[in-house]
Amino acid sequence: MSRKNRGTKLGRVLKKRKREESSSEAKPEGEETVPPTSRSSDEPIPKKVKWTNRQRVLVFGASGITQRDRHLMNDLKRIMPHSKNENKISRREHLAVINELCEVKNCNKALFLEARKKLDLYMWLSNVPHGPSAKFLVESTFTMGELRLTGNCLKGSRPVLSFDEKFDTEPHYTLLKELLTQIFGVPNHHPKSQPFVDRIITFSILDNRVWFRHYQILQEDGALAEIGPRFVLNPIKIFGGSFTGATLWENPHYVTPSAYRTQLKAIAGTKYLNRQQQKIKYMSTAPEITYQSLPEDEVFEGETLTKAAELTGMEIDTEEVKKKQLSFKKKKRAGKKFSKKPNPVSA
């Protein structure tokens, strides 16, 4: 081997193989191998296998998600160092295709976002390929850019997952707790993670929904600062398989967004009907005479000129007065300037 090729990778491998062959020939049979006390700089460093929990999550969305939904997806990727990217898929594709994409990307969990009517965002959490999987409606979404909070944790650090006590009361909540733990929990000794714990993710149940909050641990005494993002997951169904299978649980309190918007429009329509009914009721019940008039009020009844003639006893030519009023109005409309008396000049 030439001196030029000794520094290349192939040259180092051949040199190592030659040393192993020479050592095996020199070693007598039946003698146990003893690990060397020193290592040559040309030998590759042996890999330390510590990453036993090999959870990988494929985070991506369907075509048609809005700008805010895309920012939320990027925020989730930022706080999940064990996630992988994938291009958006068509909305016409069957959701079972996601299992094949996860197999290609070597992922065993999936977080999939899809939008409907540019208004509603749905989130799928699935254990690939055998299930189970859960479908949620994402409500009250706020991204990191919108909140502008003061929290700032180390990128790639491992979070502490905190769950509400209500997750242990119902079987479907227990299943969701395990699914959320495996998806949002960063595995220990992950290559892209940092060996520090300086943040906490809380999942709480309120109003039959799962509330997601993300905080930074400021001090050991429990001082926290919110980082974001924040959103609310309204569970819809839990399936036995991955994006398919039998329905294990269905939310009886779930109302579709379209039905909810229809209810709001119906309530807004009843406001107009109530207002019209109040007008009709007022007109039907209003008294004809609200109060008794005074005898002096007769002065203001009838035409002004005729009433003035009756009271003063003078003859007033009403037609001539009307002509003067018409001519005055015409001049005013034409924009003519009326003559004014000149101001006296000071001596």
Image (tube, rainbow, N blue to C red):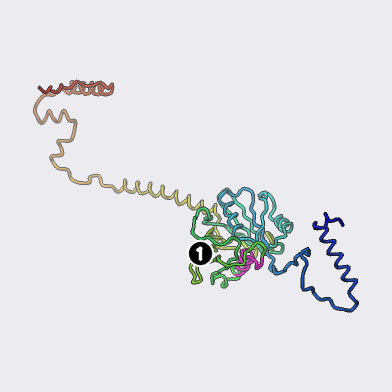
Q: Quadrant of the N terminus?
A: bottom right
Q: Nearer the viewer, residue 213 or 315?
A: 213
Q: Furthest residue to the front? A: 3
Kind of residue at badge 1: Asp
Magenta stretch: give its range.
174-189
Judge from the rendering whether residue 31 lies leftward or rightward of residue 322; answer left or right.
right
What residue lies at 19% left-to-right and 30% top-to-bottom? 303
Residue 182 among magenta residues:
yes
Is residue 140 visible in the rendered structure shown here?
yes
Residue 196 among magenta residues:
no
Is residue 245 visible in the rendered structure shown here?
no
Residue denoted by label 1: 207
**Which picture quadrant has residue 17?**
bottom right
Label 1 Cα crowd, 10 Å radius (few <14 / some 14-19 / many 20+): few
Judge from the rendering whether residue 303 lies leftward or rightward of residue 193; answer left or right.
left
Q: Nearer the viewer, residue 14 or 286?
A: 14
Q: Furthest residue to the left? A: 313
What residue lies at 85% left-to-right and 61% top-to-bottom? 14
Q: Measured from the top left, where is residue 6 in percent x and y? A: 82, 58
Judge from the rendering whether residue 94 lies leftward or rightward of residue 319; answer left or right.
right
Q: Nearer the viewer, residue 114 or 302?
A: 114
Q: Measured from the top left, where is residue 321 in percent x and y? A: 18, 23
What residue lies at 34% left-to-right and 49% top-to-bottom? 281
Image height check: is 299 above or below 327?
A: below
**Which picture quadrant has residue 306?**
top left
